[in-house]
Amino acid sequence: MKQLVLWLVLIVAVATTASLTVVHFKRASSTLQQFVSPGPLSARHAYLGDRCASCHEPTVGVTVVKCTACHANAERLLGRQPTAFHASIQECAACHVEHQSTNSRLIAMDHVELAKVGARTLARASRTDAASAATIESLETWLRIRIPDQLDEGSAREALNCTGCHSTKDRHLGLFGKDCAQCHIMAQWTIAEFQHPSPRSTNCAQCHQAPPSHYMMHFDMISKKIAGQEDAQVAGCCGPAQVNQCYRCHQTTSWNDIRGVGYYKHH
């Protein structure tokens, strides 16, 4: 009987010690993770909490395999023309940087890093595979190189062909050509020094192209009536209003600021 009691006491002691060890190890592990963590995750990844292995590979770091485990089926991302390249890029961490803060965006837009990713993608692409031909042509157009070794990190930022990526979002509709760098810099699209021509200018169509609705009956039935530019009313003044005569209806403060009407929200 005494021997049985001793065995029970021993089992309880071992179990208690093991439990305390596990609890202590978890606390120590959690404390260690907090100690070595480079910073909080963004709101999008906050649910991962202290599960570092969800994204990190021991001795390697973040790998594309870990990223695609969650994002490979991102149909909205892969289905849009400007972002469809993610399907074959095979690299994520160069542009998508975590541990910045809880309210940070996951995009660190460094054109040189993106160019290096493009050069590595070009190196991997098979020139005998017909399916890779479009990717190779696109990369060569954007990077202005034929082989990856030609990429010079020092001059890559200035050498990149902006329209290789941004031609689908040209707000100038081709009116200013393809040399974006003559006005824009890579740090930001806005141009601090830009000054709009005089509000008295009548050459708006040099830079601005009317929307498709202005080339339809909508222009005669709605737009001109709202602005008081119906042909019958202005015939004795300056003739029928034309689509390229932006100044007849619009003001330089805003496209929705209609002359003689004020701010007008059509939709």
Image (tube, rainbow, N blue to C red):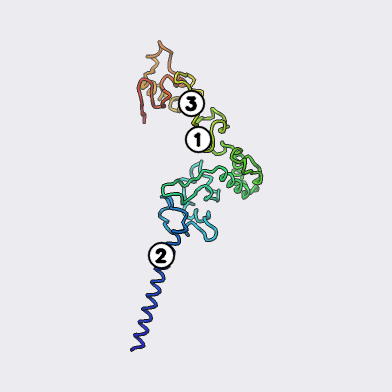
Q: Which residue is mark 1?
A: 189
The answer to whether residue 24 is above or below residue 79 is below
Q: Which residue is mark 3?
A: 195
- Judge depth for marks 2 and 1 and give the one in front: 2
Q: Amino acid at mark 3?
A: Gln
Q: CA distance from mark 1 to mark 3?
A: 15 Å
Answer with mark 1 or mark 3, whichever residue precedes in sequence: 1
- Describe the element under mark 3 as helix, strand or loop: loop
- Describe the element under mark 1 as helix, strand or loop: loop
Q: Residue 44: x and y, percent?
A: 42, 50
How many dots with numbers? 3
Answer with mark 2 or mark 3, whichever residue precedes in sequence: 2
**Residue at the farthest top position:** 236
Q: Amino acid at mark 1?
A: Trp
Q: CA distance from mark 2 to mark 3?
A: 60 Å
Q: Amino acid at mark 2?
A: Arg
